Amino acid sequence: MDVPLAPISVARVRRPAAVGTICLGLYLLGMDLTVLNVALPDIQKELHPSTAQAQWIVDGYALVLGGLVLSTGAVTDRIGRRLAFTSGLILCAAVSVIGALATSPGVVVIARGGMGAGAALFMPATLSIIRNLFPEPALRRRAIAAWSAVAGLGTLTGPVIGGVLVERFSWRAGFWINVPLALTAVLLALVLVPETRAGRAERPDIVGTVLSAAGLTILVWAVIEAPTKGWTSQPVLIAFVAAGVLLGALAIWQSRARAPMLPPFLLRDRRIVGGTVALAMMSFAVLGALFVLTLYLQNILGYTPLEAGLRTLPQSAAMAAGAVAALPLLNRCRAAMPIILGLLLASAAFSFWALTTPGSGYGRLLAVELVAGLGVGLVSAAGTEAVIGAIPPDRAALGSALNDATRQVGASLGVAVQGSVLATVYTNQLTRRLTDLHLTSPSASRPTGRGLPGSMTTDQLSPEIGRAVTAAIRSAFVDALDVTAAVAAAVTLVTAVAAAYWLRHR
């Protein structure tokens, strides 16, 4: 049973204002996932990160968030949800200052990881506060739909905000913007959000946290570094084995621990299993595709950071529409229908994107964004309701943490896997095309160096050779894009089939 700690009862709180405050913090979290995507070319020019470091800049935030959030769910229940919310935001703002002042790619990666730690502290509080503000199922579904829409809008509008900041200021503004937003959310939460905590909070699972964070980090490191070091190189193979051992030890520990961060009873509920897997794999497909998409818009189609960001907005609008459309489906039937429908829509969209050619323009991508965005909205709202609706009220923070962890682990693996597939296929295809053109000089092969896939570095070549190399770069990138899109399509299709199995009974 939850214990209200504020002098005013939850029933008398102005609930819309409290939800608005929570959603402001949630929007900041979603925005931080992608705000630096369009800034990667500018970071490349100033700090010269490798392709792997660029992936870590994008991925470090989601990876730390996903690795810690299950354990911080227990911390949230113990110390109080409002306190966890405000503390996480303050940490996120403080670490953002370090990122804004960074002079090396490594410091940027560390700052992104620190922001993920702050987000891991406050994110479980968002849904658990909503769960306790709205005990009525119908009102809770509306609040969760709003939560899902805001989370998605933050993620998908991040490139737009990043584009504005990069063009008017610099990539560093992508860190500075967190400070006023986080502090505003903290002040509003202290006034508008009631404090509650669980009547019986579990102790944090330190061993489980260490095993999950270490296993996931090593796994993602192996996937990101494999294109550079080689998929069968000794460091990469050792990392894969170590990750398997750590994650296997995590599974054993969770089955035997007195207070595991992932209680076994959760995995016996079909709604929880189906909802979390659907959310994780949708994040895998969409966040990985968004990483590829921003490189495609800037390096291949030639848009500026702001122009590229604006061209991701249709997906945001479609996602919000999908979250709204999920409500009548949830009221009339089980969560299975909107989840499966959303996954099938996403799979169809990515299959269409896998047919992209060097001559394709933004029109094809627009169709992909609209259909995939609608699918994302359906899965996000219905999957979250499936998970939260199955969790006991006094374990609300645990349910929120589980929901959040699956999203972020899926997102970090999506960027790692799709980014690595992109880098591997792009390098192989470009090398083959340059060899066919009998261009093997260092200047002609510079696009395969430390630059991001698709980056053009042909200024020192003659006009004729430069045009040939540019065409080779475009073709190689599009070939790689088609493979990553096919991966996303296959993952969402398989997940739709699995969700149909897990959610066939309530």
Image: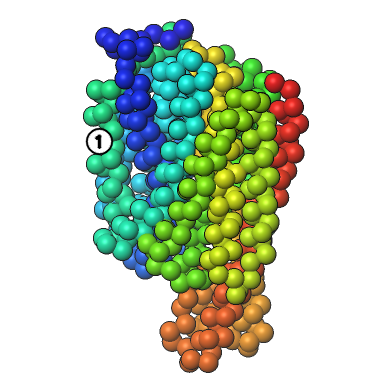
**What is the image's colouring?**
rainbow
Residue 297 position within the rendered picture, expressed as x and y whole percent measured from the top left:
49, 65
Asked if 460 appears above or below 121 in the picture, the reply is below
Which residue is labeled 1 in the image? Answer: 183
Which residue is more in the foreground, 257 or 456? 456
Asked if 85 appears above or below 395 in the picture, the reply is below
> What type is the residue that disc 1 sits on?
Leu
Residue in view at x 28 percent, y 22 percent: 192
Q: How many marks?
A: 1
Q: Is residue 104 left or right of residue 385?
A: left
Q: Is residue 211 left or right of residue 339?
A: left
Residue 126 visible at all: yes
Which residue is more in the foreground, 264 or 218? 264
Residue 446 position within the rendered picture, expressed as x and y whole percent measured from the top left:
50, 77
Quadrant of res 473: bottom right
Residue in view at x 29 percent, y 26 percent: 189
Asked if 30 appears above or below 142 in the picture, the reply is below
Which residue is more in the foreground, 347 or 69? 347
Asked if 215 appears above or below 476 in the picture, the reply is above
How many other residues sit within 10 Å of disc 1, few (<14), some (14-19) or many (≥20)? some
- The quadrant of the rendering that contains the C terminus is top right
Residue in view at x 66 percent, y 26 percent: 333
Residue 222 position within the rendered picture, expressed as x and y whole percent measured from the top left:
58, 50
Residue in view at x 32 percent, y 16 percent: 13
Quadrant of res 21: top left
Residue 54 position within the rendered picture, expressed as x and y whole percent measured from the top left:
46, 58
